Amino acid sequence: MLYPELFKSLEQVRWNMETDIPWDQFDASKLTIEQAQTIKMNAITEWAALPATEMFLRDNRTDSDFSAFMSVWFFEEQKHSLVLMEYLRRFYPALVPTEEELDKVRFEFDPAPALETLMLHFCGEIRLNHWYRCASDWHTEPVIKHIYKIISQDEARHGGAYLKYMKKALVELGDVASSSFAKIGVLMASSRRTDKPLHPTNLHVNQALFPNDTIQSRLPDPDWLERWLDGQIKFDDSWEKKVVERILHNLSLLFERSFSTVQDLNRYRKEISARLVAVAA
């Protein structure tokens, strides 16, 4: 069971919202309304950890170890939303998200294969780590710069925890797990093939609600994410390259193979698929 050790390791580095955020260093002259509006959108987006947790618990009902870890992940992700809302409450109260705005991003996700969802969120944590690091560079106000740096570190640790559960799945399920992880890995590392930001909050998850079935589509400003990435924080090709390299590096370690490109990973995916077909035959 991984949960006890993960709980201990994450507990040791957990930050305190009252004592670890330098609230007294706030500089109003360095915060624009444009910047404050993006903080609001991220606060609402982080609130979507609530329906994601409900999905994880439903689809992993037979996995008590992973379900227990959700207690830590859920707490820390909701804390990200909370600290961003606290920032607005203190310094830009007119933009604090309403309960109605938060409720809109809580809706049921369709059931999905647990292994593929695990890999999807592993890649999502890597991407968020880089998005928030880039956002910290873009902001000019020192307190929010610090907040984004802190929560980016949380996202990196969460990715590491997911990776441990992926390693456990490989031991228990072998090629079945490898196939699921490689399939989603190819998708999430192929960002240059689409204009759409590849993150769980921007993917369709409820067929009955389509097309209003992504987290981003239910925000007060549904077009915000692309504008934030492309026009504001400037998450350009150099940043995107870091995301892809990090995904490939971790999968190289996971599968004990070297993947320099998405094409390398896709060849491995086909190899695993062929092996599964042969076994089934």
Image (spheres, rainbow, N blue to C red):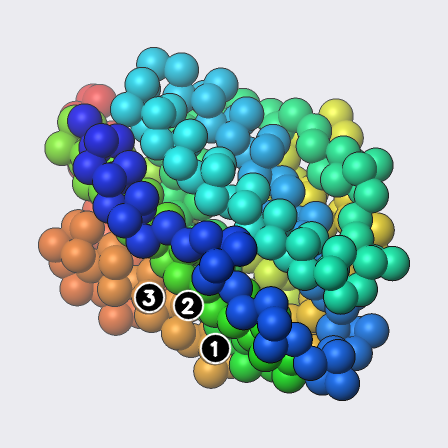
Image quadrant in which you'd find residue 245 = bottom left
Q: Is residue 119 left or right of residue 276?
A: right
Name the residue located 18 percent from the left edge and 27 percent from the top edge: 1
Q: Tag 2, which secondary structure?
A: helix
On the image, the x and y values in percent for residue 212 come to 78, 39
Q: Tag 1, which secondary structure?
A: helix
- Tell me if residue 29 can be seen: yes
Q: Is residue 92 left or right of residue 216?
A: right
Q: CA distance from mark 2 to mark 1?
A: 7 Å
Q: Can you say whether 238 is above or below 253 in the image?
A: below
On the image, the x and y values in percent for residue 236 come to 56, 80
Name the residue located 60 percent from the left edge and 54 percent from the top edge: 83
Q: Can you say whether 172 is above or below 39 in the image?
A: above
Count of numbered marks = 3
Name the residue located 62 percent from the left edge and 49 percent from the top edge: 81
Tag 1: residue type? Answer: Trp
Q: Which mark is residue 243?
A: 2
Foreground pick, 219 / 7: 7
Tag 3: residue type? Answer: Arg
Tag 2: residue type? Answer: Val
Query: Mark 1 — residue?
Result: 239
Query: Mark 3 — residue?
Result: 246
On the image, the x and y values in percent for residue 25 come to 60, 77
Name the residue located 60 percent from the left edge and 61 percent from the top edge: 197
For the residues labelled 3 and 2, say whether their Cβ atoms are less than 8 Å apart.
Answer: yes
